[in-house]
Image (cartoon, rainbow, N blue to C red):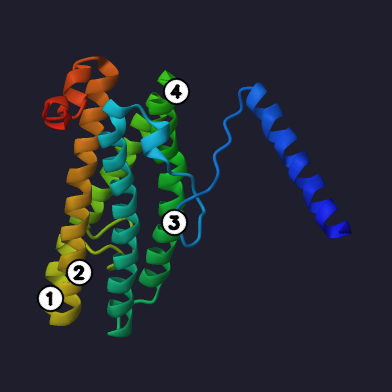
Amino acid sequence: MAKEAELNRREQEIKRREEALARAGVIIEPKNWPPFFPIIHVDISNDIPVHLQRVQYVSFASLLGLVICLFWNILCVTAAWVTGHDPRIWFLAVIYFITGCPGAYFLWYRPLYRAMRKDSAFSYGWFFLFYFFHIAFCIYAAVSPPFFYVGRSLAGIFQSISEIGENAGVGIMYFMGFAMFVLEALLSIWVFQKVYWFFRGKGSEAQMRPDTASRAPPF
């Protein structure tokens, strides 16, 4: 009984705090994604206006795409390291992953989420700045010129060509990484363009909205 009373007291205290935060205008965002181990808040269908949801979903896909690209890049570089390349390339690949994934979430995905949720010009500006760097990185990674980093720490086209002549299996992995970075760059450019058009008013709401006619009931 004492434990039950303590739990009830804590629930009431939490409820009072939530109500106080709501009155103060503070938005509570419970972590709900991924479902098996929630670490971030993603509720696009409820948080984002309907006519902007498609762009927000695609921007979320570009965030996941970056995670996949950088994880695959680690696998590529691990294979290259095992076959005799400088071990420093593996540490660089890991650094790209552990800094790039949370960096992307906090520097451009969350600002875009807030911008579309609250129509914040500051958040839009923040998103444009860091999403531009994100796109530039994806293009750079897809090309992977042999400077600014050690050896083959990015799976791009130049490193793929070099690797395919030394080890076909690793070279194919690098080519797959190159294709992933290209797709990520193209997807990100589409998101940047759509958000920019909406922000500048060059794209009407009707263009951002889904086809209402196709969703209308047939009666």
Q: Amino acid at mark 1?
A: Ile
Cα separation between marks 4 and 3: 24 Å
Q: Residues within 10 Å of mark 3 (few under 14, many from 20)?
A: few
Which numbered circle lies on residue 118? 4
Residue at 52 percent across and 53 percent down: it is: 39
- The image quarter in which residue 86 lies: bottom left
Q: Residue 89 appears at what percent x and percent y?
A: 36, 70
Cα separation between marks 1 and 4: 49 Å
Q: Residue 205 appears at what percent x and percent y?
A: 22, 18
Residue at 30 percent across and 34 percent down: it is: 53
Q: Are marks 1 and 2 in contact (CB under 8 Å)?
A: yes
Farthest-out residue, bottom = 83
Which numbered circle lies on residue 164? 1
Which numbered circle lies on residue 34? 3
List the residue tagged with mark 2. Answer: 174
Mark 4 or mark 3: whose residue is earlier in sequence: 3
Please name which of the two marks, 2 or 3, marks the residue nearer to the observer: 3
The secondary element bearing badge 1 is classed as helix
Q: Residues within 10 Å of mark 2 (few under 14, many from 20)?
A: many
